[in-house]
Amino acid sequence: MKVGRLMTRVVKTCRPHDSLSIAAKLMWDNNCGSVAVVADTGLVGVLTDRDICMAAYTQGRSLYDIQVSIAMSKKLFSCGPEDSLATAEKIMRSNRIRRLPVVDADRHLVGILSLDDIAREAAHERKGKGRAEITTEEVCDTLAAICGDSRQGAAMTA
C-alpha cells in the first residue's frame, strides 16, 4: 500500500514567526500533538507539544514571547505519497519519530502519516488473508524504538 492512501490529508500548520501560544491553541483546538511548520518554500519544520513545553521551561518566557522557529524541529524526515508503508515505517523507526510529513516533489506538505495509521492498517491486514505489508510485530518494534531512552548511555532509574 502506498502512503498516499493512508495519510491524513488535512494537516494543521503554523508559520515559523507565529508564537508558541498560537501553535499550542491550534493543537488544543484540534486535539493533535504536533503541527507542521510551513513557509512559502514548503515544509520547514515540525513542532510537537513536547517541544512547546521544553521551550517554555528552558526559555523561562511566556508562550506568547517565543516564536515557533525557536522550538520547532528543523531536522526533517519525510516521505512521498508514492512511497510504501514499509519505507515510511523504516524512516520512523530509524529516526524515532511517531509522525512523518508527506511531501510532494517540491517539498510542499500534502499530508501526514502517523504510527497510529500504520498500526491500524497492520491490525486490519492481520485479519485478512495474504501477506501483510506491515506486520504487528514490526509496528511493536518501531514503537519500542521510538519510546526507548533517547539519552545514549543514560541509566534507567526506578
Image (spheres, grey):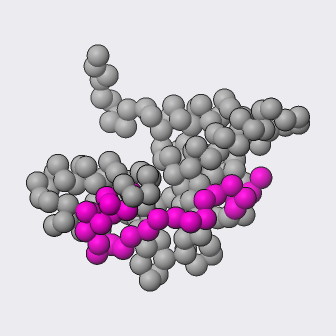
Q: Is residue 41 left or right of residue 50?
A: right
Residue 136, horizontal then vertical, whole percent: 68, 32
- Residue 50 showing in the rendered view: yes
Magenta span of residues: 1-27
Question: Is 61 above or below relative to 154?
Answer: below
On the rendered image, what quadrant is the C terminus found in? top left
Question: Is 97 above or below relative to 75?
Answer: above
Say which quarter of the image contains residue 120. Answer: top right
Residue 148, horizontal then vertical, whole percent: 43, 32
Q: Residue furthest top?
A: 158
- Which residue is at a point 22% across and 54% down the rendered structure image? 55
Question: Is 140 above or below relative to 8?
Answer: above
- Which residue is at a point 39% across and 70% down the rendered structure image? 14
Q: Is residue 38 magenta?
A: no
- Which residue is at a point 28% across and 54% down the rendered structure image? 52
Q: Is residue 46 left or right of residue 107?
A: left
Q: Nearer the viewer, residue 72 or 56?
A: 56
Q: Nearer the viewer, residue 48 or 79?
A: 48
